[in-house]
């Protein structure tokens, strides 16, 4: 096995983009693995220390989906300011996507809590 250089690591295409069919929307979308920077932004959007922050935890679904739904090149489709529009879509679809994106990116609440501790 080859030992990687800094340039090898930086140039590696490791944030996979995969298609996902959504019958309710009569088409497919792309979702991606988050970069380290995106995961940090996601975890910083959640305040698990404040028990009254259920709104914050519920909004994490939108933040995560907004970061993961992308075009075929991995570019986001939804800007942060457009997430409220996305939230108007069928909740069954959104929860299915949230589960898939969470699994794909190892973003269970346990993992988020562990990341906040580190």
Image: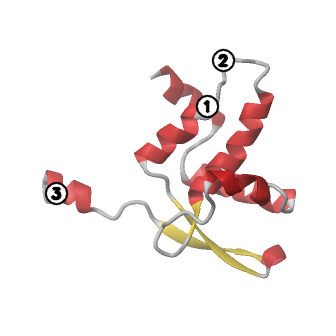
Q: Which of 58/18 is in front?
A: 58
- Disc 2 is placed on an element classified as loop
Dot 3: within a 10 Å radius of its alpha carbon, few (fewer than 14), some, or many (20 or more) residues? few
Residue name at image x 63 percent, y 39 percent: 108
- As measured in the structure, the alpha-carbon distance from the residue carrying label 2 to the one carrying label 1 is 13 Å
Residue 14 is labelled as none
Residue 4 appears in view: no
Q: Position of residue 14 (x, y in %)?
A: 37, 60
Determine which residue is flagged by label 1: 110
* Relative horizontal placement of residue 58, taking residue 49 as reference (left or right): right
Check the picture and name the quadrant holding the N terminus.
bottom left
Looking at the rendered structure, the secondary structure element under dot 1 is helix
Colour scheme used in the picture? Answer: secondary structure
The picture places residue 85, in percent across and down from the top left corner, at 78, 59
Which residue of the protein is positioned furthest toward the bottom in this rendering? 26
The answer to whether the residue labelled 3 contacts the one labelled 2, judged by CB atoms less than 8 Å apart, is no
Lower sequence index among marks 3 and 1: 3
Q: Earlier in the sequence, mark 3 or mark 2?
A: 3
Furthest toward the front, the residue is 81
Mark 2, residue position: 49
Image quadrant for the C terminus? top left
Which secondary structure, mark 3? helix
Q: Position of residue 21 (x, y in %)?
A: 70, 76
Query: Circle 3 sits on which residue?
Result: 7
CA–CA distance between discs 3 and 1? 33 Å
Q: Nearer the viewer, mark 3 or mark 1?
A: 3
Eyeballing the image, is 60 above or below 86? above
Q: From the viewer's perspective, is residue 83 above or below residue 12?
A: above
Q: Residue at x 64, y 31 (%)?
A: 46
Tag 1 or tag 2, which sits nearer the N-term?
2
């Amino acid at each position: 096995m080859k030992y990687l250089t800094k340039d090898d690591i930086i140039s590696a295409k490791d944030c996979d983009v995969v298609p996902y069919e959504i019958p309710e929307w009569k088409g497919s979308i792309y979702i991606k693995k988050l970069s380290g920077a995106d995961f940090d932004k996601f975890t910083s959007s959640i305040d698990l220390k404040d028990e009254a922050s259920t709104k914050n935890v519920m909004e994490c679904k939108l933040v995560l989906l907004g970061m993961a739904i992308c075009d075929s090149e991995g570019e986001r489709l939804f800007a942060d300011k457009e997430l409220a529009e996305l939230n108007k879509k069928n909740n069954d679809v959104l929860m299915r996507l949230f589960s898939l994106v969470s699994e794909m990116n190892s973003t269970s609440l346990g993992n988020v809590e562990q990341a906040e501790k580190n």
